[in-house]
Amino acid sequence: QKEVEQDPGPLSVPEGAIVSLNCTYSNSAFQYFMWYRQYSRKGPELLMYTYSSGNKEDGRFTAQVDKSSKYISLFIRDSQPSDSATYLCAMSEDDKIIFGKGTRLHILP
Amino acid sequence: GAVVSQHPSWVICKSGTSVKIECRSLDFQATTMFWYRQFPKQSLMLMATSNEGSKATYEQGVEKDKFLINHASLTLSTLTVTSAHPEDSSFYICSAVPSGGKAFFGQGTRLTVV
């Protein structure tokens, strides 16, 4: 079993819809949980960062962590065409970060 | 937020030549930087951990003699792809971690070996 599992998509949703992106993991020692957005041919950009179970909200983005289930989610409200990108979940125990494969998201105008 | 600058953003080189990629942390010091490789539609694969003032730590399967890493200062790490071949063509990305496991990434370098 891979340490981090993420559905690669692609996921296509209409503009304005709520998007739900998810990852599962197997290493209970992970302490930090992150979501990155990556546009084509660009480096990943940190979107959300958390280290505890529960929800963290930032504008249209909400990150959710459930350590008991080893499951993390990213919700995007009022999705926009500019949100179309690849979203990578990532988690770390120390400085070493393990990434999911990324989910390609398409927001249809 | 923290800024990591990577240069060049793209490079084309001839097979057999060497290419150097720079990664700089602009507003913080980084004793550790990381180098990743990303193939199309794939996730980032950690190649090596660059440690300031000491030898880099390479992941299994990564040739240390081919991918030379130098971390000469707290704000600069370089990756040199030596004797590049077409199969080395990829997207190379560096990252630095200022604190608490939160990594910031460079813009990436697209290397094409012809």
Image: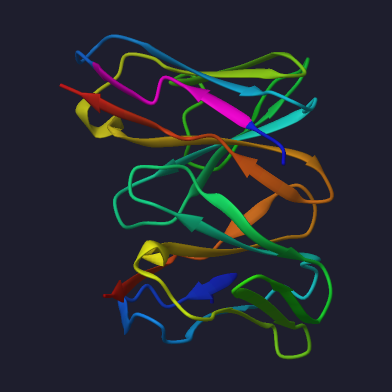
In the rendered image, the vertical position of residue B2 relative to residue B54, given as above or below? below
Tell me residue A78's x, y (percent): 48, 80
For this rendering, which residue is in front, A41 or A68?
A: A41
Extreme residue toward the bottom, this view: A69
Q: Residue at x 57, y 26 (%)?
A: B5
Looking at the rendering, the stretch of residues picked out in magenta corresponds to B4-12
Q: State the predominant SS element of the stretch in magenta.
A: strand
Q: Is residue A77 magenta?
A: no
Tell me residue B81's x, y (percent): 40, 19
Position of the C terminus of chain A, as image quadrant, is: bottom left
Q: Is residue A44 left or right of residue B109?
A: right
Mark count: 0
In the rendered image, the vertical position of residue A45 relative to residue A55, given as above or below? above
Tell me residue B63's x, y (percent): 47, 29
Q: Quadrant of residue B84?
A: top left
Q: Is residue B7 magenta?
A: yes
Q: Residue at x 76, y 18 (%)?
A: B54
Q: Residue at x 84, y 50 (%)?
A: B100
